[in-house]
Image: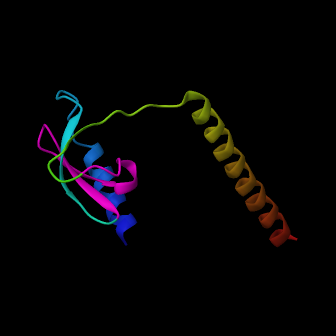
Amino acid sequence: MLAGVLMMHMFSYAAVDCRHSAPSAVVDRVEQEAAVLIAECGKQTVLPSAFLPDTVSEGDIVYIHVLTDDDATVLQKERMQQLLDQLADRHITGERKRDR
C-alpha cells in the first residue's frame, strides 16, 4: 500500500513546477519507509527513506540532485523493446494458433 502512495505522490509532484527555486527541501518528517520533504516553493513530496542518508532527521535541509545515466537508459530502452517484441510475437503466434 505504501508503495502505491509513494508513487502517487511522486507522480503528482512531477506536475508541479518548482524548477525556479533552489533544489533544496526541508525534511518535514521521517517515517519507517518514507520521508516527507517540502521544497522551497512549498510543494510537498514523499521519497523512500532509503533514498536519504541514515543521519537525516526532521528539520534538516537537503539538496536534491537528479542525475541521468545515458548508457543505462539506452540499455533499459533496449530491454523494454525486447520485451515488447516478445509480447507482440506471442500475441501474433497465439492468434495464428486460434485461427487454425
Residue 28 in the image, given as x and y percentages of width and height? 16, 53
Q: Is residue 3 placed above or below 82 in the rendered structure? A: below
Give residue 89's quadrant in the image: bottom right
The residue at 11%/43% (across/down) is 42
Residue 8 in the image, given as x and y percentages of width and height? 32, 59
Residue 78 in the image, given as x and y percentages of width and height? 67, 39
The residue at 30%/50% (across/down) is 55
> Left of 37 or right of it: where is 66?
right
The residue lying toward the viewer, choosing from 17 and 42, is 42
Residue 27 in the image, given as x and y percentages of width and height? 19, 49
Give residue 35's quadrant in the image: bottom left
Magenta span contains residue 99: no
The single residue placed furthest to the front in the displayed view is: 55
The residue at 82%/69% (across/down) is 99
Q: Quadrant of the C terminus?
A: bottom right
The residue lying toward the viewer, choosing from 68 and 64, is 64
Give residue 30's quadrant in the image: bottom left
The residue lying toward the viewer, choosing from 39 and 90, is 39
Give the number of marks: 0
> Left of 69 or right of it: where is 57?
left
Q: Quadrant of the N terminus?
A: bottom left
Q: Is residue 81 placed above or below 29 in the rendered structure? A: above
Q: Which residues are magenta?
A: 33-56
> Left of 82 or right of it: where is 53?
left
Magenta span contains residue 51: yes
> Left of 59 or right of it: where is 73?
right
What is the image's colouring?
rainbow
